[in-house]
């Protein structure tokens, strides 16, 4: 049931009590409920997964939607290329005297039409068809690039959230330690210089929290822009965790290259542009072939049976053989082939780097195992307790604090890098992101 229909139904049910004032609270409650529902709808999506972010970006991002117009324009060019030129109709009078009391009487009318010869129309259709393929492949390539950008920003938000959560946890624990050591200083158990070092370190911890919060704010704003302005609630929550996908299959560089050359949309787009340039060369070579102009007319002569004329005309290519345009078309074709060769070499380099990044990220993540993270935390707890009990040094405590902070951040960064390496490997190989 729609909100408007629900309101009308509740209003009808409350109408018998309106006279005694009982319907007013109910009407206010219904109004508040509907207002809250409308406000929630206006705020946008409250929760966002990675797949939802990509889906929304592909449908609402202006850059993604602009590629649809490119495809539509290429389709229009294909339609136009298949059309024949329009004939011309003429009606006029020849050599007739016109007096003020007599209107002119046509005594000649006919039609002219230019018939294309030499395969120029077929070459134009081939150019337009290749343009449609190029536009469609470019659209797919642009959307894959957008999906990778969204995936990258989504992982960045997850990383920022994780780092901020740890920074706030570390901040709370360090502030508690500073408070306890202030009491120890008052009891004369530690020197003023030690308390001063703790307070200086506390400011550094506070700055870390601020920097983490700023990074999270910026990445959330960029993710919201990529998904589409107004799509997300200002306080939207991302749903996911830092957990790289499992390693499946053979990720050799040669396998990735072969798959990329078969599946990459940007490679298909350049191949279509090369085909279009080749068709343009064929068209430039056929332009000098004369088109035939046909004229047919009827001459009306008063007092006689009249006459008709039929004529054929064609331009004689004596001076202009379309040499300059042909040279330009050949150069464009050679450039299109070089662009395809360049992208093929780029794909090879990208595949080698993507496979290596994936391997290194997995190794780095393995080095920051859960045992190492737990060991760093336990070392911090031991050194903190020892210092507070007067058995350890401030230097050991601060060193353990710094080591734990570095390990925690490195572990979270390694998780994010492994996720991004997996996404980049899929992108380079031509697979679709989730």
Image (cartoon, rainbow, N blue to C red):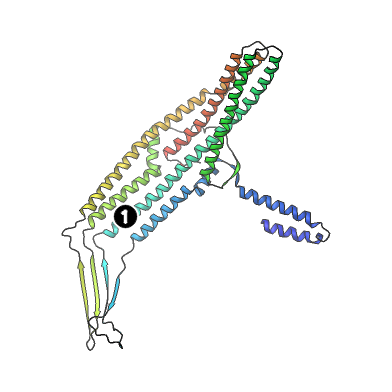
Residue 110 appears left or right of 318: right
Check disc 1 and report the residue beneath it.
126
Residue 158 visible (yes or no): no
Quadrant showing the N terminus: bottom right
| Whether residue 63 can be seen here | yes
Task: Name, please, the residue furthest toward the right.
Answer: 20
- Report which quarter residue 383 is drawn in: top right
- What's the residue at 48%, 42% (across, down)? 147
For this orientation, the residue located farthest to the left is 318
In terms of secondary structure, where does tag 1 sit?
A: helix
- What percent of the width, then of the height, locates residue 195? 64, 16
Question: What is the total number of numbered labels drawn onto the structure image?
Answer: 1
Question: In the image, residue 300 lies at what x, y percent?
Answer: 24, 83
> Is residue 173 toward the left or the right of residue 153 in the image?
right
Q: Name the side, left or right, on which 68 lies relative to 223.
A: left
Q: Quadrant of residue 191?
A: top right
Residue appearing at x 31%, y 51% in the figure: 276
Tell me the crowding category of disc 1: few under 14, some 14 to 19, or many 20 or more residues within 10 angstroms, Cα based.
many
- Residue at 65%, 26% in the rendered image: 172
Residue 377 at x, y percent in the picture? 61, 21
Q: Residue furthest top?
A: 391
List x then y, in percent, for residue 394.
61, 14
Q: Nearer the viewer, residue 85 or 214?
A: 214
Instruction: Give the camera-side residue of 345 and 28.
Output: 28
Relative vertical location of residue 98 with respect to residue 195 in this rendering, above or below: below
Question: Is 222 drawn above or below residue 91 in the view shown?
Answer: above
């Amino acid at each position: 049931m729609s909100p408007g229909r629900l309101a009308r139904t509740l209003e009808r049910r409350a109408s018998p009590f309106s006279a005694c004032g009982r319907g007013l609270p109910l009407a206010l409650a219904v109004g508040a409920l509907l207002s809250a529902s409308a406000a929630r709808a206006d705020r946008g999506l409250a929760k966002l997964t990675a797949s939802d972010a990509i889906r929304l970006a592909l449908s609402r991002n202006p850059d993604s939607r602009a590629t649809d117009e490119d495809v539509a324009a290429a389709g229009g060019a294909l339609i136009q290329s298949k059309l024949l030129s329009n004939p011309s109709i003429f009606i006029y009078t020849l050599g007739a005297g016109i007096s003020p009391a007599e209107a002119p009487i046509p005594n000649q009318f006919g039609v002219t039409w230019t018939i294309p010869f030499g395969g120029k129309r077929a070459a134009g259709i081939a150019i337009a068809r290749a343009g449609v393929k190029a536009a469609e492949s470019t659209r797919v390539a642009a959307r894959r690039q957008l999906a990778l950008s969204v995936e990258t920003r989504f992982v960045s938000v997850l990383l920022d959230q994780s780092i901020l959560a740890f920074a706030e946890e570390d901040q709370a624990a360090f502030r508690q330690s500073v408070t306890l050591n202030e009491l120890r200083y008052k009891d004369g158990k530690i020197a003023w210089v030690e308390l001063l070092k703790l307070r200086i370190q506390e400011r550094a911890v506070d700055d870390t929290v601020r920097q983490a919060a700023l990074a999270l704010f910026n990445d959330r704003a960029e993710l919201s822009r990529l998904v589409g302005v107004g799509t997300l609630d200002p306080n939207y929550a991302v749903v996911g965790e830092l957990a790289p996908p499992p390693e499946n299959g053979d990720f050799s560089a040669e396998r990735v290259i072969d798959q990329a050359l078969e599946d990459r949309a940007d490679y298909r787009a350049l191949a279509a542009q090369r085909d279009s340039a080749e068709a343009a060369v064929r068209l430039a070579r056929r332009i000098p072939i004369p088109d035939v102009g046909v004229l047919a007319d009827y001459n009306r002569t008063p007092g006689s049976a009249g006459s008709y004329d039929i004529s054929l005309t064609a331009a004689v290519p004596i001076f202009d053989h379309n040499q300059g345009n042909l040279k330009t078309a050949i150069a464009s074709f050679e450039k299109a082939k070089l662009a395809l060769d360049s992208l093929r070499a780029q794909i090879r380099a990208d595949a080698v780097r993507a496979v290596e990044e994936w391997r290194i990220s997995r190794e780095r993540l393995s080095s920051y195992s859960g045992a190492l993270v737990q060991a760093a935390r336990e070392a911090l707890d031991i050194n903190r307790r020892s210092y507070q009990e007067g058995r350890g040094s401030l230097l050991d405590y601060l060193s353990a604090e710094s080591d734990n902070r570095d390990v925690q951040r490195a572990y979270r960064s390694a998780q994010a890098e492994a996720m991004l390496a997996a996404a980049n490997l899929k992108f380079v190989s031509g697979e679709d992101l989730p």
